[in-house]
């Protein structure tokens, strides 16, 4: 029994390390695939242009104009490592010690400057519940707070799904010769396809008639807005190109 309990942390650490490695490999593969299929110049400039260039620009500067060795930098690293080790030992020895070493490490990062307030609220609520509440209150609050975390990830996942659907619509339109600046009319009922099509052509959508209208009623509306094409639904979501009279 003692052996099984002692091997559990090592087993969890192994699977955690394996998951991190798999995530890194998938992230690299996905980044390269998106960069080569969509074009790196069309992606986020920081991740595909400014960020990678900044590292090489710094390396080039150090090679062309090398700086003298500054002893203050390794000293600062040693002091920071020693202080982090001190925080770890304090957390291990004293349950009441409030400062976590991970917070000290990530506190100086860029993301911390944008996300410090949610962490502060979470820490404040947990501290108040732990000091003045009960165990039952703490357990009852775990579900809603975990829901807040999962809700954040769910929102990001939803926008990824919408982006994938919008991308498919844009690719279909581009394959039919419809691009930036072309006027597009949407002839769809209220459905998910209507939302994704509207986002895909948001900058050029000039006509959104009722999907239940007949062709006789749709033609004047398209003619007044000079739509060169329309997105229609015929059983399945199809893209139909129709040059309207101007």
Image (cartoon, rainbow, N blue to C red):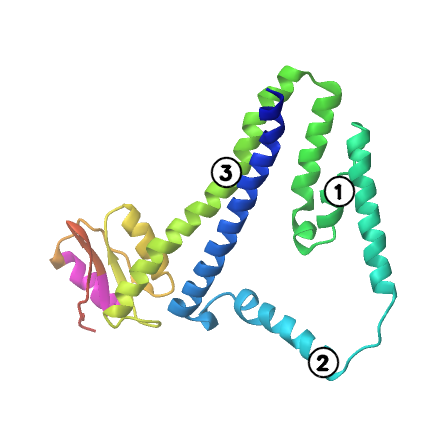
Q: Which element carries disc 1, helix, strand or loop?
A: helix
Residue 145 pos. (x, y %): 58, 31
Q: Comparing marks 3 and 1, which lies closer to the viewer?
A: 1
Mark 3 / mark 1, whichever is N-terminal: 1
Mark 2, residue position: 63
Q: Where residue 151 is drawn, which disc sits there?
A: 3
Q: Do the residues labelled 3 and 1 touch (CB within 8 Å)?
A: no
At label 3, counting other C-alpha atoms closer than 10 Å, the crowd grade (few under 14, some 14-19, many 20 or more) is few
Which quadrant would residue 163 be assigned to in this image? Answer: bottom left
Decide whether the magenta segment is chiefly helix, strand or loop.
helix
Mark 3 or mark 2, earlier in chain: 2
Whether residue 226 appears in this view of the structure is no
Label 3 element class: helix
The correct choice, above or below, for 230 with respect to 134 in the image is below
Residue at image location 78% in from the left, 32% down from the top: 92
Horizontal side of residue 160 vs 118, given as left or right: left
Vertical position of residue 42 compared to residue 209: above or below: below
Q: Does the magenta segment cover residue 173?
A: no
Whether label 1 touches label 2, CB < 8 Å: no
Nearer mark to the viewer, of 3 and 2: 2
Asked if residue 154 shows in the view, the reply is: yes
Q: What residue would you read off at disc 1?
A: 101
Per the model, the C-alpha gap separating discs 1 and 2 is 35 Å
> What span is in magenta?
217-230
Q: How crowded is mark 1: few (under 14 residues within 10 Å), some or many (20 or more)?
A: some
* Distance from Cα at disc 3 to Cα at disc 1: 27 Å
Between 241 and 153, the one lying in front of the other is 153
Q: Nearer the viewer, residue 110 or 59?
A: 59
């Amino acid at each position: 029994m003692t052996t099984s309990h002692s091997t559990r942390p090592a087993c969890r650490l192994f699977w955690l390390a394996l998951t991190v490695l798999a995530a890194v490999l998938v992230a690299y593969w996905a980044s390269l695939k998106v960069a080569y299929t969509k074009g790196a110049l069309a992606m986020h400039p920081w991740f595909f242009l400014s960020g990678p260039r900044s590292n090489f620009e710094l390396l080039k500067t150090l090679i062309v104009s090398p700086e003298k060795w500054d002893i203050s930098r390794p000293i600062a690293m040693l002091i920071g490592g020693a202080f982090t080790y001190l925080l770890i030992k304090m957390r291990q020895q004293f349950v009441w010690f409030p400062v976590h070493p991970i917070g000290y490490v990530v506190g100086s990062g860029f993301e911390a400057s944008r996300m410090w307030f949610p962490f502060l609220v979470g820490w404040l609520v947990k501290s108040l519940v732990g000091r003045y509440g009960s165990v039952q209150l703490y357990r009852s609050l775990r579900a809603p707070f975990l829901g807040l975390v999962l809700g954040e990830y769910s929102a990001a996942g939803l926008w990824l799904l919408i982006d994938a659907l919008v991308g498919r619509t844009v690719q279909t339109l581009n394959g039919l010769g419809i691009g930036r600046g072309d006027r597009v009319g949407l002839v769809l009922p209220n459905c998910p396809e209507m939302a994704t099509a509207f986002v895909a052509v948001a900058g050029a959508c000039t006509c959104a008639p009722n999907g239940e209208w007949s062709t006789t009623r749709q033609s004047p509306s398209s003619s007044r807005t000079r739509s060169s094409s329309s997105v229609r639904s015929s059983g399945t979501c199809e893209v139909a190109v129709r040059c309207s009279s101007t």
